[in-house]
């Protein structure tokens, strides 16, 4: 092959290599975008898992923005919001009761927050157990009752209410602690306890088990608020997700469908 022919081949190879390099860099640029690729991080109470799981799936499908849901007891979620890792800030905070958002706001952590739904405490019975219709049934029988620990909103609010009304002392010996309200409900479902004190919206996820509204539990209520955090690395996206949650035909629809009393 002559020199001219070899030069043409080398030129063609160089062009092909250059095109390949540009294409590879373009792919790398699209896949590397660390700021855009980072998911929105939502710290939420365990009682809100069914609603936020549905909402996040819809939001991801609608926007292409990933959402990472981190669930636990409300007090635990507040601690994680208060002490975020520098490289892993939270974007939104959704505890089971507004008091935790108020606490976060007092610490200067909240950019904005809005109410979403309300819940109240009810008694969820284990399958096949004798009926409980009054507080006396609950207190006089040798029944085991699951109640989330004080790190969970329902655990703290129930203990406060029953202590104030003088009823906690007779119930306390029968109480079996749990990490979250969902753990309490599951303990009743599996028959590890005879009953569980849970939020009404949580009880509705267990349709095969009887639910009892005792007057003694009246007043144990929570308002769910969702907050955008000041620490968010993507405040505009965090606010967009909040608006999605508050949309009557999107986020709030899931709360309604799951039995929450929606604030509109």
Image (spheres, grey):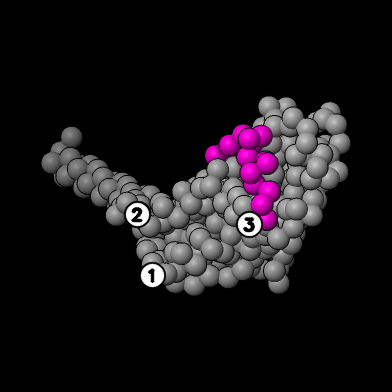
233 on left or right of 151? left
Residue 178 in the magenta stretch? The answer is yes
The percent position of residue 77, horizontal first and vertical second, equals: 47, 51
The residue shown at (63%, 63%) is 223
Dot 1: within a 10 Å radius of its alpha carbon, few (fewer than 14), some, or many (20 or more) residues?
few
Farthest left residue in view: 3
The percent position of residue 173, horizontal first and vertical second, equals: 63, 35
Does the rendering let one see residue 164? yes
Above or below, 114 against 70 in this view is below
- In the picture of the structure, the residue carrying the numbered disc 2 is 83
The residue shown at (71%, 60%) is 219
Indicate the secondary structure of the residue bearing disc 1.
loop
Dot 3: within a 10 Å radius of its alpha carbon, few (fewer than 14), some, or many (20 or more) residues?
few
The percent position of residue 110, horizontal first and vertical second, equals: 44, 68
184 on left or right of 39? right
Specify the quadrant that holds the N terminus.
top left
Lower sequence index among marks 3 and 2? 2
147 on left or right of 230? right
98 on left or right of 186? left
Magenta region: which residues? Answer: 165-179
- The answer to which of 74 and 257 lies nearer the viewer is 74
Give me the C-alpha separation between circle 1 and circle 2.
13 Å
- The answer to which of 27 and 144 lies nearer the viewer is 144
Indicate the secondary structure of the residue bearing disc 2.
loop
Give me the C-alpha separation between circle 3 and circle 2.
32 Å
- In the picture of the structure, the residue carrying the numbered disc 3 is 164
Above or below, 212 against 230 in this view is above
Lower sequence index among marks 1 and 3? 1
Does the rendering let one see residue 19? no
- In the picture of the structure, the residue carrying the numbered disc 1 is 108
Indicate the secondary structure of the residue bearing disc 3.
helix
Between circles 3 and 2, the one closer to the viewer is 3
């Amino acid at each position: 092959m002559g020199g001219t022919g070899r030069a043409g081949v080398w030129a063609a190879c160089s062009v092909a290599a250059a095109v390949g390099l540009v294409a590879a860099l373009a792919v790398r640029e699209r896949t590397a975008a660390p700021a855009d690729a980072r998911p929105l991080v939502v710290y939420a109470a365990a009682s809100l898992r069914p609603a936020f799981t549905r909402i996040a799936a819809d939001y991801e499908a609608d926007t292409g923005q990933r959402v990472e849901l981190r669930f636990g007891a409300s007090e635990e979620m507040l601690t994680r919001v208060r002490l975020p890792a520098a490289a892993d800030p939270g974007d939104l905070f959704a505890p089971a009761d507004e008091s935790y958002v108020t606490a976060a706001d007092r610490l200067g952590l909240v950019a904005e927050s809005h109410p979403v739904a309300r819940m109240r405490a009810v008694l969820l019975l284990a399958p096949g157990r004798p009926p409980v219709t009054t507080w006396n049934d609950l207190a006089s029988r040798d029944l085991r009752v699951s109640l989330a620990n004080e790190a969970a909103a329902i655990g703290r609010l129930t203990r406060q209410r029953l202590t104030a009304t003088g009823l906690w002392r007779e119930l306390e010996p029968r109480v079996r602690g749990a990490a979250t309200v969902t753990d309490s409900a599951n303990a009743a479902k599996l028959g590890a306890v005879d009953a569980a004190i849970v939020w009404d919206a949580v009880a509705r996820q267990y349709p095969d088990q009887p639910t009892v509204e005792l007057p003694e539990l009246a007043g144990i209520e929570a308002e769910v608020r969702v907050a955008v955090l000041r620490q968010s690395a993507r405040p505009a996206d965090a606010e967009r997700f909040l608006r999605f949650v508050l949309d009557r035909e999107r986020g709030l629809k899931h709360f309604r469908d799951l039995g929450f009393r929606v604030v509109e």
